[in-house]
Amino acid sequence: MLKEIGAVPNDTVVLKENSLYINGHCQSITVSSQDSRGGELFPYPTPLVISNDNFWLVSDPAQGFDSRYFGPINRSAFTHVARPIF
């Protein structure tokens, strides 16, 4: 799974009105109620402040499966870091 870090420790995350807000700023990512096969999706309960050693992951396209649905991820779960080469 390749995801971008959207929020870091001490950031506040809120999912409301089908939108993602990080520290009060609306992101260009929506929150869906169904996956691509029509299965029901449940957003992770917010508001929440990201705790130490945890990160909120986001993905592109906006319809991707990320922390909007499975919540913050602990740093210990990261196995690699991807960096652009250009």
Image (tube, grey):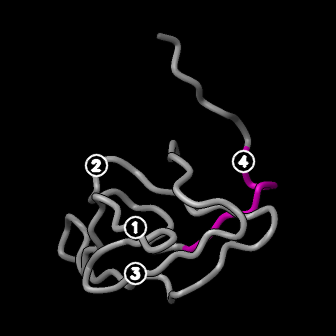
Give the x, y percent position of residue 6.
52, 56
Residue beneath label 4, please? 78
Provide the secondary structure element on which disc 1 rests.
strand
Amino acid type at image mark 2: Pro
| Real-space Cα separation, disc 3 to disc 1, in angstroms | 11 Å
- 56 lies above or below 61: below
Dots 3, 2 in contact, CB < 8 A = no
Residue displayed at 66% across by 59% down:
8
Q: Please report the residue visible at 72 percent of the width from the left and 48 percent of the height from the top.
A: 78
Q: Distance between the residues labelled 1 and 2?
A: 19 Å
Q: Is residue 28 left or right of residue 5?
A: left
Q: Do the residues labelled 4 and 3 touch (CB within 8 Å)?
A: no
Q: Is the residue marked by circle 2 packed among few (<14), some (14-19), or many (20+) residues within 10 Å?
A: few
- Comes first in the chain, label 3 or label 2: 3
Type of amino acid at the residue the image marks with label 3: Leu
How far apart are the alpha carbons under marks 1 and 4?
Answer: 26 Å
Q: Which of marks 4 and 3 is nearer the N terminus?
A: 3
Q: Which residue is disc 3 drawn over?
A: 15
Tell me the residue that label 1 is attached to.
25
Give, as a three-letter code, the residue at label 1. His
Mark 2 — residue?
61
Q: The disc labelled 4 sits on which kind of residue?
A: Phe
| Residue ranking furthest to the top | 86
**What whole-number distance in Å separates the C-alpha atoms at marks 3 and 2?**
17 Å
Residue 16 is a magenta residue: no
**Left or right: 84 with respect to 28?**
right
Please report whichever mark, 3 or 1, sits nearer to the chain's N-terminal start.
3
Range of the magenta residues? Answer: 71-78
